[in-house]
Image (cartoon, grey):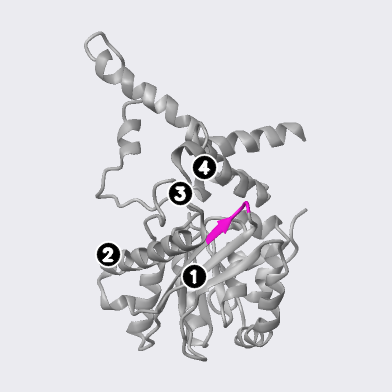
Amino acid sequence: MKNLYLPSLQNRGVDDFTSDMGIKIRRCVSPAFRLSCIYAFDHKIVVDGYPKLEKDTPYIFASSHGFVEDIQALIATLDRNAYILTGAIDQLKYHPNFYGLWINGFIIVDRSNTQSRKDAVTKMERIIKNGTSIMMYPEGAWNGNENMLIMPLFKGPYLLASNLKKDGVNTKVVPVAQYKDVENKTIYVKVGEPFDITKYDYKEGLIKLRDEMATLKWNIMEKNLPISKRDELGRDPRYDFMLSNAQEFINGKWVEDLYEDEIIMYKDKNIPYREDILKTFENVKITKENAHLIAPILAELENEKKYDLKTYMHEYHKNKILKK
């Protein structure tokens, strides 16, 4: 069943996506709404650290992203209202939880549309200038990478803070890390110290933010999670990790197959990535002369498909449609 009214917000401009009065009302109802988020799901929230933030001062909260409840968990953790930047257009159309996000306040962005991305930054600037904070997830998608605590970040936090500074509004970025202990139904949230990201250039600022977020996440894991021996991880822990990430998407109850847009990672165009290099071999013709070089690479590519979250979710969605 489609949501009523909410999808129309996708096409609202900078001046009419929310009113100044709406921003003030959301700040007033925020304490009650944040409290309701604590009881909105059956996971316990443990705040593992929270800095002393200036009262009535807006911040840019930049959080890790990795599971269904991490938006509600952060809303419940913060001591103030913060509009959410989200690119979940599918859920805007179909998921009833978005009515809750509307009460909180959100900005929708179509990541495939250049103008929508530009407008989203201008909308966030308007929110900050009206005295309300912003929360965003600069990894751009749920982190399904088994080797990175925090994936490379998109430039949203830096771009927003930089644009505001040009207008004389100094807004600090607050790093946040979250971790979901599925077995114990506990969500850990750790909020770091705010800092002026504009003191650095674009690349250095995002590296600084990513390092802060990764350190916070490591601190959560080191303090709260048991140490597992390798022989306790099962026969194929990498596949189990992929399945756990797939389950988060399944729990999110996505209606449309948008996994090409939702399962992404920021990639620097100047850096060659191993998986992209390997894919260039897919169309190479095997001959007697090159077989000893190409065949092992193609075999590795075929084996990698087993661990590809996009492939798994495409198949899951196709099978779900066939069963209807």
Q: Alpha-carbon neighbours of circle 4 within 10 Å: few (<14), some, or many (≥20)?
A: some
Mark 3 or mark 4, earlier in chain? 4
Residue 277, image x, y percentages = 30, 35
Looking at the image, which residue is at 59% across and 62% down?
187
Residue 119, image x, y percentages = 48, 70
Which residue bears the numbered disc 4? 241
Q: Alpha-carbon neighbours of circle 3 within 10 Å: few (<14), some, or many (≥20)?
A: some
Which residue bears the numbered disc 3? 264
Closer to the eye: label 3 or 4? 4
Amino acid, disc 2: Lys
**Marks 1/4: CA distance?**
23 Å
The one of 54 and 125 positioned closer to us in this rendering? 54
**Does the CB distance between marks 1 and 3 fall below 8 Å?**
no
In the displayed structure, would residue 310 be above or below residue 213? above
Which residue bears the numbered disc 2? 203
Task: Specify start and end residues of the magenta stretch as a single range.
Answer: 179-183
Mark 1 or mark 2, earlier in chain? 1
Which residue bears the numbered disc 1? 190
**Does the CB distance between marks 1 and 2 fall below 8 Å?**
no
**Does the CB distance between marks 3 and 4 fall below 8 Å?**
no
